[in-house]
Image: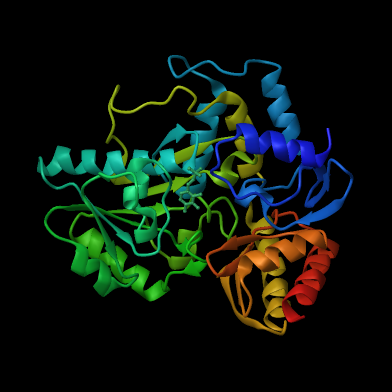
Amino acid sequence: MSFEELQREDKEYISNTYNRFAVDLARGEGATLWSEEGKKYVDFGSGIAVNTFGVNDEVWKKAVTDQLNKIQHASNLYYTRPQAHLAHLLCKKTGAKKVFFCNSGAEANECAIKAARKYSFDKYGEGRFRIVTLKNSFHGRTIATLSATGQDAMHKYFMPFLEGFSYADPTFEGVKKCCSEQTCAVMIEPIQGEGGVRPLDAEEVKKIESFCKKHDILLIVDEVQTGNGRTGKLYAYEHFGISPDIVTTAKGLGGGLPLGAAIFFEKCRDVFGAGDHGSTFGGNPVACAGAISILERLDEKLMLEVQGKSAYLFTHLGRIKNVLSVTGMGLMIGLETTKPSREIAEKCLERGLIVLTAKNKVRLLPPLNVKKDEIDFALQILNEVISE
Ligand SMILES: *Cc1c(COP(=O)(O)O)cnc(C)c1O
Protein backbone atom coordinates (compact mmCIF):
# COMPACT_ATOMS: atom_id res chain seq x y z
CA MET A 1 0.00 0.00 0.00
CA SER A 2 1.39 3.41 -0.94
CA PHE A 3 1.41 6.33 1.50
CA GLU A 4 -1.28 8.06 -0.60
CA GLU A 5 -3.51 4.97 -0.33
CA LEU A 6 -2.98 4.93 3.44
CA GLN A 7 -3.94 8.59 3.68
CA ARG A 8 -7.13 7.87 1.70
CA GLU A 9 -8.05 4.91 3.93
CA ASP A 10 -7.35 6.91 7.09
CA LYS A 11 -9.42 9.85 5.86
CA GLU A 12 -12.27 7.55 4.89
CA TYR A 13 -12.49 5.52 8.10
CA ILE A 14 -10.92 7.49 10.97
CA SER A 15 -13.02 10.09 12.75
CA ASN A 16 -11.77 13.54 11.68
CA THR A 17 -10.29 14.59 15.02
CA TYR A 18 -6.60 14.79 14.09
CA ASN A 19 -4.68 17.10 11.81
CA ARG A 20 -1.88 14.63 11.07
CA PHE A 21 1.59 15.36 9.74
CA ALA A 22 2.34 13.60 6.44
CA VAL A 23 4.45 10.67 7.60
CA ASP A 24 3.74 7.02 8.47
CA LEU A 25 6.26 6.06 11.13
CA ALA A 26 7.26 2.42 10.94
CA ARG A 27 10.26 1.62 13.10
CA GLY A 28 13.24 3.10 14.86
CA GLU A 29 16.08 3.02 17.34
CA GLY A 30 16.11 5.45 20.28
CA ALA A 31 15.36 8.92 18.92
CA THR A 32 15.91 7.94 15.28
CA LEU A 33 12.87 6.77 13.35
CA TRP A 34 12.16 5.57 9.82
CA SER A 35 8.99 5.88 7.77
CA GLU A 36 7.52 2.93 5.86
CA GLU A 37 9.27 4.29 2.75
CA GLY A 38 12.61 4.31 4.59
CA LYS A 39 13.02 8.05 5.15
CA LYS A 40 15.01 8.79 8.30
CA TYR A 41 13.84 11.16 11.06
CA VAL A 42 15.23 12.42 14.33
CA ASP A 43 12.39 12.38 16.84
CA PHE A 44 11.98 15.41 19.13
CA GLY A 45 8.38 14.52 20.01
CA SER A 46 8.54 11.05 21.64
CA GLY A 47 4.90 10.49 20.65
CA ILE A 48 4.03 13.51 22.86
CA ALA A 49 6.39 12.74 25.75
CA VAL A 50 5.37 9.07 25.85
CA ASN A 51 8.39 7.14 24.56
CA THR A 52 10.60 8.00 27.54
CA PHE A 53 13.55 5.96 26.26
CA GLY A 54 12.68 6.24 22.58
CA VAL A 55 11.68 3.25 20.50
CA ASN A 56 13.09 -0.26 20.49
CA ASP A 57 14.47 0.23 23.99
CA GLU A 58 15.84 -3.18 24.97
CA VAL A 59 15.21 -2.89 28.71
CA TRP A 60 11.58 -1.83 28.30
CA LYS A 61 10.95 -4.40 25.55
CA LYS A 62 12.29 -7.20 27.74
CA ALA A 63 10.13 -6.15 30.70
CA VAL A 64 7.05 -5.95 28.50
CA THR A 65 7.62 -9.19 26.57
CA ASP A 66 8.52 -11.14 29.73
CA GLN A 67 5.17 -10.10 31.18
CA LEU A 68 3.36 -10.77 27.87
CA ASN A 69 4.64 -14.32 28.02
CA LYS A 70 3.01 -14.73 31.45
CA ILE A 71 -0.40 -13.02 31.53
CA GLN A 72 -1.54 -9.96 29.56
CA HIS A 73 -4.52 -8.94 31.70
CA ALA A 74 -6.24 -10.16 34.81
CA SER A 75 -8.68 -7.32 35.82
CA ASN A 76 -8.67 -5.66 39.19
CA LEU A 77 -10.72 -8.46 40.73
CA TYR A 78 -7.38 -10.18 41.34
CA TYR A 79 -3.86 -9.40 42.47
CA THR A 80 -1.03 -8.98 39.95
CA ARG A 81 2.60 -8.45 40.88
CA PRO A 82 3.64 -5.69 38.45
CA GLN A 83 0.84 -3.38 39.65
CA ALA A 84 1.68 -3.65 43.36
CA HIS A 85 5.43 -3.40 42.64
CA LEU A 86 4.97 -0.29 40.50
CA ALA A 87 2.81 1.41 43.16
CA HIS A 88 5.42 0.53 45.80
CA LEU A 89 8.20 1.96 43.62
CA LEU A 90 6.25 5.19 42.94
CA CYS A 91 5.61 5.65 46.67
CA LYS A 92 9.22 4.87 47.55
CA LYS A 93 10.53 7.42 45.05
CA THR A 94 8.09 10.22 45.92
CA GLY A 95 7.10 9.70 49.54
CA ALA A 96 3.49 9.18 48.45
CA LYS A 97 1.22 6.72 50.28
CA LYS A 98 -1.09 5.12 47.69
CA VAL A 99 -1.62 4.95 43.95
CA PHE A 100 -4.67 4.50 41.74
CA PHE A 101 -3.89 3.24 38.24
CA CYS A 102 -5.82 4.07 35.09
CA ASN A 103 -4.97 4.31 31.39
CA SER A 104 -4.55 7.95 30.44
CA GLY A 105 -3.93 11.47 31.65
CA ALA A 106 -7.57 12.46 31.48
CA GLU A 107 -8.53 9.48 33.63
CA ALA A 108 -5.82 10.29 36.16
CA ASN A 109 -7.26 13.81 36.46
CA GLU A 110 -10.82 12.46 36.66
CA CYS A 111 -9.65 10.34 39.56
CA ALA A 112 -8.00 13.33 41.25
CA ILE A 113 -11.19 15.39 40.88
CA LYS A 114 -13.27 12.59 42.42
CA ALA A 115 -10.71 12.09 45.21
CA ALA A 116 -10.67 15.80 46.08
CA ARG A 117 -14.47 15.97 46.26
CA LYS A 118 -14.62 12.78 48.32
CA TYR A 119 -11.93 14.03 50.73
CA SER A 120 -13.91 17.18 51.29
CA PHE A 121 -17.26 15.40 51.54
CA ASP A 122 -15.91 13.01 54.19
CA LYS A 123 -14.48 15.85 56.27
CA TYR A 124 -16.83 18.79 55.69
CA GLY A 125 -20.03 17.31 54.22
CA GLU A 126 -21.84 18.44 51.10
CA GLY A 127 -21.17 21.67 49.18
CA ARG A 128 -17.39 21.98 49.33
CA PHE A 129 -16.84 20.73 45.81
CA ARG A 130 -15.28 23.56 43.81
CA ILE A 131 -11.89 23.20 42.14
CA VAL A 132 -9.70 26.08 41.02
CA THR A 133 -7.58 25.52 37.91
CA LEU A 134 -5.47 28.01 35.98
CA LYS A 135 -6.22 29.98 32.87
CA ASN A 136 -4.58 28.48 29.78
CA SER A 137 -4.33 25.05 31.46
CA PHE A 138 -4.99 21.69 29.83
CA HIS A 139 -6.27 18.74 31.83
CA GLY A 140 -7.83 16.39 29.26
CA ARG A 141 -10.71 15.69 26.88
CA THR A 142 -13.41 14.04 28.98
CA ILE A 143 -16.28 16.25 30.10
CA ALA A 144 -14.90 16.70 33.62
CA THR A 145 -11.32 17.35 32.53
CA LEU A 146 -12.47 19.66 29.70
CA SER A 147 -14.46 21.52 32.33
CA ALA A 148 -11.27 21.73 34.40
CA THR A 149 -9.32 23.04 31.40
CA GLY A 150 -9.05 26.83 31.63
CA GLN A 151 -9.42 27.72 27.97
CA ASP A 152 -12.63 29.27 26.62
CA ALA A 153 -11.86 27.92 23.15
CA MET A 154 -12.32 24.40 24.52
CA HIS A 155 -15.68 25.13 26.17
CA LYS A 156 -17.80 24.84 23.04
CA TYR A 157 -20.40 22.40 21.64
CA PHE A 158 -20.50 19.96 24.53
CA MET A 159 -22.63 21.92 27.00
CA PRO A 160 -23.47 21.57 29.76
CA PHE A 161 -19.99 21.28 31.20
CA LEU A 162 -19.39 20.06 34.73
CA GLU A 163 -20.22 22.49 37.50
CA GLY A 164 -17.69 23.65 40.04
CA PHE A 165 -14.58 24.88 38.24
CA SER A 166 -13.08 28.39 38.31
CA TYR A 167 -10.10 29.54 36.29
CA ALA A 168 -7.50 31.66 37.99
CA ASP A 169 -4.64 33.84 36.77
CA PRO A 170 -1.46 31.83 37.38
CA THR A 171 -0.51 33.77 40.52
CA PHE A 172 -1.19 33.51 44.24
CA GLU A 173 -3.53 36.51 44.14
CA GLY A 174 -5.33 35.04 41.15
CA VAL A 175 -5.86 31.69 42.88
CA LYS A 176 -6.85 33.29 46.19
CA LYS A 177 -9.49 35.38 44.44
CA CYS A 178 -11.08 32.23 42.99
CA CYS A 179 -11.15 30.30 46.29
CA SER A 180 -14.09 30.28 48.69
CA GLU A 181 -15.45 28.10 51.53
CA GLN A 182 -16.70 25.83 48.75
CA THR A 183 -13.23 25.14 47.34
CA CYS A 184 -11.85 21.63 47.89
CA ALA A 185 -8.81 21.72 45.58
CA VAL A 186 -6.47 23.73 43.39
CA MET A 187 -5.08 21.97 40.33
CA ILE A 188 -1.96 23.19 38.52
CA GLU A 189 0.45 22.07 35.80
CA PRO A 190 4.01 23.00 36.93
CA ILE A 191 4.73 23.82 33.29
CA GLN A 192 1.67 24.39 31.13
CA GLY A 193 2.37 22.02 28.26
CA GLU A 194 -0.40 22.28 25.67
CA GLY A 195 -0.80 25.92 26.73
CA GLY A 196 2.62 26.74 25.25
CA VAL A 197 5.36 25.30 27.52
CA ARG A 198 4.87 27.97 30.18
CA PRO A 199 6.48 27.26 33.56
CA LEU A 200 4.68 28.70 36.58
CA ASP A 201 6.52 31.22 38.74
CA ALA A 202 8.19 29.36 41.62
CA GLU A 203 7.43 31.99 44.27
CA GLU A 204 3.78 32.17 43.28
CA VAL A 205 3.53 28.38 43.44
CA LYS A 206 5.07 28.37 46.95
CA LYS A 207 2.51 30.92 48.09
CA ILE A 208 -0.34 28.95 46.52
CA GLU A 209 0.91 25.88 48.38
CA SER A 210 0.95 27.63 51.78
CA PHE A 211 -2.51 29.08 51.18
CA CYS A 212 -3.87 25.62 50.29
CA LYS A 213 -2.27 24.03 53.36
CA LYS A 214 -3.72 26.72 55.64
CA HIS A 215 -7.28 26.20 54.35
CA ASP A 216 -7.12 22.42 53.89
CA ILE A 217 -7.56 22.87 50.15
CA LEU A 218 -5.93 19.96 48.34
CA LEU A 219 -3.10 20.78 45.95
CA ILE A 220 -3.33 18.63 42.83
CA VAL A 221 -0.33 18.74 40.51
CA ASP A 222 -1.03 17.58 36.96
CA GLU A 223 2.24 15.97 35.85
CA VAL A 224 0.78 14.08 32.92
CA GLN A 225 3.32 15.74 30.62
CA THR A 226 5.98 17.06 33.01
CA GLY A 227 6.35 13.83 35.01
CA ASN A 228 8.64 10.83 34.82
CA GLY A 229 11.98 12.55 34.35
CA ARG A 230 10.88 14.86 31.54
CA THR A 231 12.02 18.07 33.26
CA GLY A 232 15.24 16.75 34.79
CA LYS A 233 13.58 15.72 38.08
CA LEU A 234 11.43 12.63 38.60
CA TYR A 235 8.43 14.95 38.99
CA ALA A 236 8.51 18.64 38.12
CA TYR A 237 6.96 19.76 41.43
CA GLU A 238 10.38 18.99 42.98
CA HIS A 239 11.79 22.06 41.16
CA PHE A 240 9.30 24.20 43.11
CA GLY A 241 10.01 22.78 46.58
CA ILE A 242 6.33 22.02 47.23
CA SER A 243 4.55 18.95 48.59
CA PRO A 244 1.36 18.20 46.67
CA ASP A 245 -1.55 16.15 48.00
CA ILE A 246 -2.22 14.43 44.69
CA VAL A 247 0.04 14.07 41.65
CA THR A 248 -1.45 12.85 38.39
CA THR A 249 0.68 11.38 35.65
CA ALA A 250 0.46 9.30 32.46
CA LYS A 251 2.24 9.91 29.12
CA GLY A 252 5.87 8.90 29.83
CA LEU A 253 5.03 6.63 32.78
CA GLY A 254 4.27 3.60 30.62
CA GLY A 255 7.13 4.29 28.20
CA GLY A 256 4.81 3.65 25.24
CA LEU A 257 1.88 1.66 26.62
CA PRO A 258 -1.26 3.33 28.01
CA LEU A 259 -0.90 3.87 31.74
CA GLY A 260 -2.01 6.66 34.05
CA ALA A 261 -1.77 7.14 37.79
CA ALA A 262 -3.20 9.32 40.53
CA ILE A 263 -0.59 9.36 43.27
CA PHE A 264 -1.95 10.12 46.74
CA PHE A 265 0.04 11.65 49.57
CA GLU A 266 -0.79 11.43 53.30
CA LYS A 267 -4.08 13.37 53.34
CA CYS A 268 -5.60 11.25 50.59
CA ARG A 269 -4.18 7.91 51.68
CA ASP A 270 -7.59 6.46 52.53
CA VAL A 271 -9.86 8.71 50.52
CA PHE A 272 -11.30 5.82 48.52
CA GLY A 273 -12.94 2.68 49.84
CA ALA A 274 -13.89 -0.45 47.92
CA GLY A 275 -16.25 0.43 45.06
CA ASP A 276 -15.64 4.20 45.15
CA HIS A 277 -13.63 4.17 41.95
CA GLY A 278 -12.29 1.63 39.47
CA SER A 279 -11.06 0.79 35.99
CA THR A 280 -11.18 -2.43 33.97
CA PHE A 281 -7.84 -1.92 32.25
CA GLY A 282 -6.22 0.27 34.93
CA GLY A 283 -2.86 -1.04 36.09
CA ASN A 284 -2.64 -3.59 33.32
CA PRO A 285 0.28 -5.92 34.16
CA VAL A 286 2.07 -5.47 30.82
CA ALA A 287 1.89 -1.68 31.04
CA CYS A 288 3.00 -1.79 34.70
CA ALA A 289 5.92 -4.13 33.97
CA GLY A 290 7.10 -1.69 31.29
CA ALA A 291 6.64 1.25 33.67
CA ILE A 292 8.76 -0.40 36.38
CA SER A 293 11.61 -0.71 33.87
CA ILE A 294 11.26 3.02 33.13
CA LEU A 295 11.00 4.28 36.72
CA GLU A 296 13.93 2.16 37.90
CA ARG A 297 16.19 4.02 35.48
CA LEU A 298 15.03 7.54 36.37
CA ASP A 299 17.78 7.97 38.95
CA GLU A 300 19.95 10.92 39.96
CA LYS A 301 22.57 10.14 37.30
CA LEU A 302 20.04 10.12 34.47
CA MET A 303 18.41 13.32 35.76
CA LEU A 304 21.82 15.04 35.65
CA GLU A 305 22.24 13.86 32.06
CA VAL A 306 18.81 15.28 31.18
CA GLN A 307 19.78 18.58 32.82
CA GLY A 308 23.04 18.64 30.87
CA LYS A 309 21.34 18.02 27.52
CA SER A 310 18.79 20.66 28.46
CA ALA A 311 21.43 23.30 29.22
CA TYR A 312 23.15 22.56 25.89
CA LEU A 313 19.86 22.89 23.99
CA PHE A 314 18.84 26.10 25.78
CA THR A 315 22.22 27.71 25.01
CA HIS A 316 22.18 26.84 21.32
CA LEU A 317 18.47 27.43 20.72
CA GLY A 318 18.76 30.89 22.26
CA ARG A 319 21.35 31.81 19.62
CA ILE A 320 19.16 31.03 16.61
CA LYS A 321 18.07 34.06 14.62
CA ASN A 322 14.30 34.80 14.86
CA VAL A 323 13.96 32.92 18.16
CA LEU A 324 12.10 35.25 20.54
CA SER A 325 12.14 33.08 23.66
CA VAL A 326 13.12 29.63 24.91
CA THR A 327 11.00 28.31 27.80
CA GLY A 328 10.57 25.09 29.74
CA MET A 329 12.72 22.79 31.85
CA GLY A 330 14.77 19.71 31.15
CA LEU A 331 13.76 18.12 27.86
CA MET A 332 10.43 19.94 27.69
CA ILE A 333 11.24 23.05 25.69
CA GLY A 334 9.13 25.70 23.97
CA LEU A 335 10.44 27.99 21.24
CA GLU A 336 8.73 31.20 20.37
CA THR A 337 9.78 32.45 16.95
CA THR A 338 8.70 35.04 14.42
CA LYS A 339 6.94 32.37 12.34
CA PRO A 340 3.81 30.23 12.80
CA SER A 341 4.73 27.09 14.77
CA ARG A 342 2.90 24.68 12.47
CA GLU A 343 4.82 26.00 9.48
CA ILE A 344 8.12 25.40 11.27
CA ALA A 345 7.06 21.89 12.27
CA GLU A 346 6.11 21.07 8.65
CA LYS A 347 9.43 22.38 7.33
CA CYS A 348 11.41 20.48 9.97
CA LEU A 349 9.57 17.30 9.01
CA GLU A 350 10.49 17.71 5.34
CA ARG A 351 14.13 17.92 6.45
CA GLY A 352 13.90 14.86 8.70
CA LEU A 353 13.22 16.35 12.14
CA ILE A 354 10.05 15.67 14.10
CA VAL A 355 8.98 18.49 16.42
CA LEU A 356 5.66 19.32 18.07
CA THR A 357 3.78 22.56 18.52
CA ALA A 358 1.89 24.03 21.48
CA LYS A 359 -0.09 27.14 20.61
CA ASN A 360 2.39 29.61 19.04
CA LYS A 361 5.40 27.62 20.28
CA VAL A 362 7.49 24.94 18.67
CA ARG A 363 7.60 22.23 21.35
CA LEU A 364 10.55 19.89 21.82
CA LEU A 365 10.11 16.66 23.80
CA PRO A 366 12.92 14.30 22.74
CA PRO A 367 13.36 10.91 24.41
CA LEU A 368 15.47 11.23 27.57
CA ASN A 369 18.19 9.06 25.99
CA VAL A 370 18.51 11.28 22.90
CA LYS A 371 22.14 11.26 21.72
CA LYS A 372 24.54 14.16 21.19
CA ASP A 373 24.63 13.73 17.40
CA GLU A 374 20.81 13.64 17.30
CA ILE A 375 20.68 16.85 19.34
CA ASP A 376 23.17 18.51 17.00
CA PHE A 377 21.16 17.39 13.96
CA ALA A 378 18.00 18.88 15.51
CA LEU A 379 19.79 22.16 16.26
CA GLN A 380 21.10 22.35 12.70
CA ILE A 381 17.64 21.79 11.16
CA LEU A 382 15.91 24.16 13.56
CA ASN A 383 18.55 26.78 12.78
CA GLU A 384 18.03 26.39 9.01
CA VAL A 385 14.24 26.49 9.23
CA ILE A 386 13.83 29.26 11.83
CA SER A 387 16.56 31.63 10.70
CA GLU A 388 15.82 31.49 6.97
C1 LIG B 1 -1.76 15.16 27.68
C2 LIG B 1 -2.23 15.78 28.93
C3 LIG B 1 -3.45 15.38 29.54
C4 LIG B 1 -4.37 14.36 28.91
O1 LIG B 1 -3.78 13.11 28.80
P1 LIG B 1 -4.47 11.98 27.88
O2 LIG B 1 -3.62 10.78 28.12
O3 LIG B 1 -4.43 12.47 26.47
O4 LIG B 1 -5.85 11.80 28.39
C5 LIG B 1 -3.78 15.96 30.75
N1 LIG B 1 -2.99 16.88 31.34
C6 LIG B 1 -1.83 17.29 30.78
C7 LIG B 1 -1.00 18.30 31.48
C8 LIG B 1 -1.42 16.77 29.55
O5 LIG B 1 -0.29 17.20 28.98
Q: Is residue 323 left or right of residue 249?
A: right
* Position of 12 relative to 331 (above/below): above
Residue 287 appears in which quarter of the rendering? top right
- Residue 9 is drawn in which quadrant? top right
Q: Quadrant of the N terminus?
A: top right
Q: Nearer the viewer, residue 348 or 366?
A: 348
Left or right, residue 242 beside residue 54: left
Residue 2, position in %: x, y?
Answer: 84, 37
Residue 223, horizontal then vertical, whole percent: 47, 52
- Whole-percent x and y of residue 51? 67, 46
Q: Which residue is found at the position 40% from the left and 60% from the top?
A: 137
Q: Going 68% across and 20% down the picture, which residue do you hit?
A: 68
The quadrant where residue 138 appears: bottom left
Quadrant of the rendering where the C terminus is positioned: bottom right
Give the residue displayed 69% in from the left and 68% down from the top: 344
Q: Residue furthest right?
A: 38
Q: Is residue 188 above or below residue 113?
A: below
Instruction: Work out whether residue 245 can be spotted.
Output: no
The picture places residue 233, in percent across and down from the top left corner, at 56, 59
